[in-house]
Image (tube, rainbow, N blue to C red):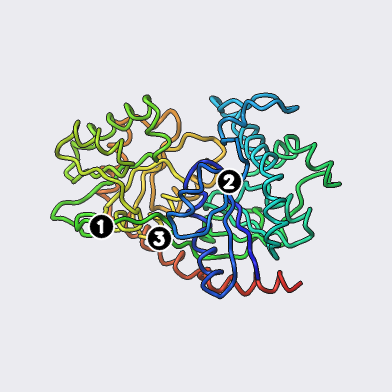
Amino acid sequence: MKVLFIAAGTSPAGVFALAPLATAVRNAGHEILVAAFDELAPTVAAVGLPAVAIADGHTTESIKQLDRPGGPIEFPWSPEQELPYVGRWFGRQAAVSMDGLLRLADAWRPDLVIGGTDAHAAALLGSRLGIPYVRQAWDWLHFDGVERYANEELAPELAEAGLERLPDPDLFIDICPPSLIPPGAEPGRPMRWVPGNRQRKLEPWMYSRGERRRVCVTLGSFRTAMPEMFAYLCALVERLSELDAEIVVAANEATAQKIRARFPDVRSDWVPMEFLVRTCDAIVHAGGLTTLNAMAAGTPQVVVNQFQAFERSLGLLEQQGSSVILHRDDKSPDNTFEACDRILSDDSYARQARELARELGKLPPPSEVVGDLEALARG
């Protein structure tokens, strides 16, 4: 069986999410390739998977200004712009990927195509080639309304393929803990989430606990590259340093250097999160796969959320009792300090975090899902 994985977006998280299943497919003796924009290809290679760059001459940022019927795509500065932005941007990624994917498919002839949540090129390619298409959730969040805008953006490509809308997947793989799936959400084939991060040589402090409680802060490499977000990160670190705990900032090397220079008593480095989070008593972060890292480790969380679309899922996480959620207007350093102090002072958060880890650990591993893929490919 030959399986083509398609990673969309600019965030490495889109690769990390697909890496465990791709690795399981290869370990079962099948051939795999992972297609992505050129800017993500190094991340694919860094997790030990074969990378193929597509959409030559484009980046995921440059395509926002292409001369297409929808016009330029602007970042969503207000809640009502979120779903149109996500649908149109990922739809446009699919549109500019198709020529390269069709050339790749002509040379390599996949039996099955797998894409992440918004990797709409996988749906289009599966339809064009007449092969099964699988969608794997790339995180645990559930929200609706994106498909309308993706279909609008992809109208020319859909018409060329003789389709009115993006086809449904032949199989949907969900990595969300069952207790956090919203009522009425699309049912999926459950799969245990396991880490798929880049690795590095680890220092002892990265995988072992010290004498003090530990709080990790991470906002993601792309966010902290923006000056206003780095300033916010520094304000968070300064306020959280007043806790009776060791503060660790997980960041890329450029950001970590600046953090170490500004806060000599704070550890900061790039660390594979699955190791660091297990040494922590709480973690402050902006969501996404970091949430799943914390869930799997049984670590309480403070999630600093920017997007209205995520509020339903995050509300379920907060109700579960392992986390505190701070939304757009609530995420001040003072509020974050109070949330961390509450988690460190109330053992119920840690108990509920361990319960969520047990639930996640009971889901079938990627190796068990490979049989479903083999059955699809056989028809």
Q: Are marks 1 and 2 in contact (CB under 8 Å)?
A: no
Q: Give me the residue at 66% from left, 34% from top.
A: 88
Viewport quadrant of the N terminus = bottom right
For this orientation, the residue located farthest to the right is 162
C-alpha distance separating marks 3 and 1: 20 Å
Q: Residues within 10 Å of mark 2 (few under 14, many from 20)?
A: many
Q: Are marks 3 and 1 in contact (CB under 8 Å)?
A: no
C-alpha distance separating marks 3 and 2: 24 Å
Residue named by callout 2: 8
Q: Nearer the viewer, mark 3 or mark 2?
A: 2
Q: Please name whichever residue, 267 or 31, is drawn nearer the observer in this view of the structure.
A: 31
Residue named by callout 3: 296
Quarter of the image for residue 267 reads top left
Q: Nearer the viewer, mark 3 or mark 1?
A: 1
Q: Mark 3: which amino acid?
A: Ala
Q: Is residue 65 above or below residue 369?
A: above
Q: Please name whichever residue, 332 or 206, is drawn nearer the observer in this view of the structure.
A: 206
- In the structure shown, which secondary structural element does the residue marked by tag 2 occupy? loop
For this orientation, the residue located farthest to the front is 107
Q: Give me the residue at 59% from left, 52% from top.
A: 35
Q: Earlier in the sequence, mark 1 or mark 2?
A: 2
- In the structure shown, which secondary structural element does the residue marked by tag 1 occupy? loop
Residue named by callout 1: 202
Quarter of the image for residue 67 reads top right
Q: Earlier in the sequence, mark 3 or mark 2?
A: 2
Q: What percent of the width, then of the height, locates residue 158?
A: 80, 43
Q: Mark 1: which amino acid?
A: Leu
Q: Please name whichever residue, 326 or 175, is drawn nearer the observer in this view of the structure.
A: 175
Is residue 348 visible in the rendered structure shown here? Answer: no
Q: What percent of the width, then of the height, locates residue 179?
A: 52, 59
Q: Please name whichever residue, 108 or 263, is drawn nearer the observer in this view of the structure.
A: 108
Q: Mark 2: which amino acid?
A: Ala
